[in-house]
Image: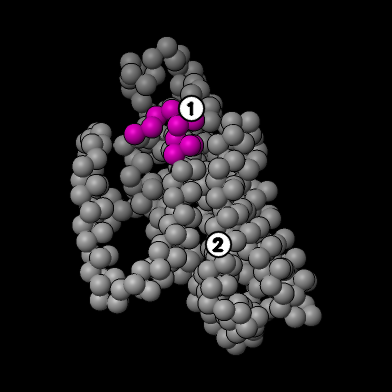
Amino acid sequence: MLPAEHDYTRALSMSRLAYDLENLFIPALAAALLSLVTYNWLFAGTSVGFLAFAALVVSCVLPKPAPVEHTGRPHTKAASGLRLFWVPRLRALLALDLAFAASGAMITVNTVVLVRDHLHRTAGDVSLARGAYGAGSMAAALTLPRILKRVSDRAVMLPAAFALPVVFAAYGIATSEGPSWPALLAAWTAFGAACSAVLTPTGRLIRCSAASADLPAAFAARFSLSHSCWLLTYPLAGWVASAAGTVTVGWMLGAIAMAGTLTAVLIWPAPDMARLDHRHHHLPPGHPHLAEVRLTSDGYPHSHDYVIDHLHPYWPAMRRTARP
């Protein structure tokens, strides 16, 4: 829908902003409505809301995707999206997803425990703590389009990922003598900003790594793989907190966030070039892809913006040549 890079980046930022606003606004709206109506009416109103939103979605006119021919069995089709994640920057993205999931699990699973049981504050303060996280996330999302005009995705995402274990450590040190409400608000705000800086540009990485026809498979694969990180960190955040306490789980999740970030640094090359030199060995002479490319003793060498597709099924770093 948005082929221009600047427009796409702004759309990613707005999407993240809408997500955070929803998390802040919807619970407050539900609480306000429950002071006026019963649960039955609230659920009935929500059902009407779903129908209205469905009508809005149907009313949107979207460009039709180009038809894509897939061959092979269903598991082969499913694996096509996973194959795209041999691209170094996308494998690094999965490691960053693990760091993000560690931080998100701390927020989602343990906020209520920390605010209600440890700090003995009101239910409204739980919303305030989540609001601090959302405020940090929205602030980062609003500034990212301007930042990404000047620096690369890697230069934004990796420092933000390193900030996650730093926040875990700072919060652990600040609360070593007991829980602290100001420390929690500060940490949750920092978590929100860092998580948003890691998560918001991810669509840009996927889009520059796969051909247009393969983008649905790539986004679907990324959705599944990133949620496998949540499948790991969510239970850990709850089990370890109940068995050893929230201080221990904070240090453990911080270690997971650091491991994911260090893995991403090792996998993601710097500089991360879009245009790559590579060679084709088995394309026939006169193939449209080889226009104006001369044959040498080592195939057809040329250079262009490199994405994984049927002509380039492997990343040059993984294979010496790109074999169709």
Instruction: Identify the residue at image location x=30%, y=73%.
Output: 37
Q: Quadrant of residue 134?
A: bottom right
Residue at coordinates 68% horizontally, 48% vertically from top-left?
159
As drawn, which residue projects farthest toward the bottom?
243
Q: Image point 40% across, 64% down: which residue?
A: 29
- Up-down relation of residue 159 to residue 26 (above or below): above
Q: Please identify the quadrant where the C terminus is shown.
A: top left
Labels 2 and 1 touching (C-beta < 8 A):
no
Q: Main secondary structure of the magenta part?
A: helix
Q: Is residue 185 left or right of residue 304?
A: right
Q: Is the N terminus in the top left, top right, bottom left or bottom right quadrant? A: top left
Q: Is residue 32 left or right of residue 264?
A: left
Q: Which mark is residue 293?
A: none
Residue marked by disc 1: 305
Coordinates of residue 149 in the picture (x, y in percent): 59, 31
Residue 110 visible here: no
Of labels 2 and 1, earlier in sequence is 2
Residue 120 in the image, given as x and y percentages of width and height? 62, 83
Q: Residues within 10 Å of mark 1 (few under 14, many from 20)?
A: few
Q: In the image, what residue type sits under mark 1?
A: Asp
Is 131 magenta? The answer is no
State the extent of the magenta-drawn residues as a range: 1-11
Residue 266 sits above or below residue 231 on the image:
above
Viewer can see residue 84:
yes
Tell me how the rendering is colored. Answer: one colour
Q: Amino acid at mark 2?
A: Gly
In this orientation, which residue lies closer to the viewer: 9 or 280? 9
Mark 1 residue element = strand
Q: Measure how far apart labels 2 and 1 are at the Cα level.
A: 41 Å
Element carrying mark 2: helix
Quickly name the residue at label 2.
Answer: 131
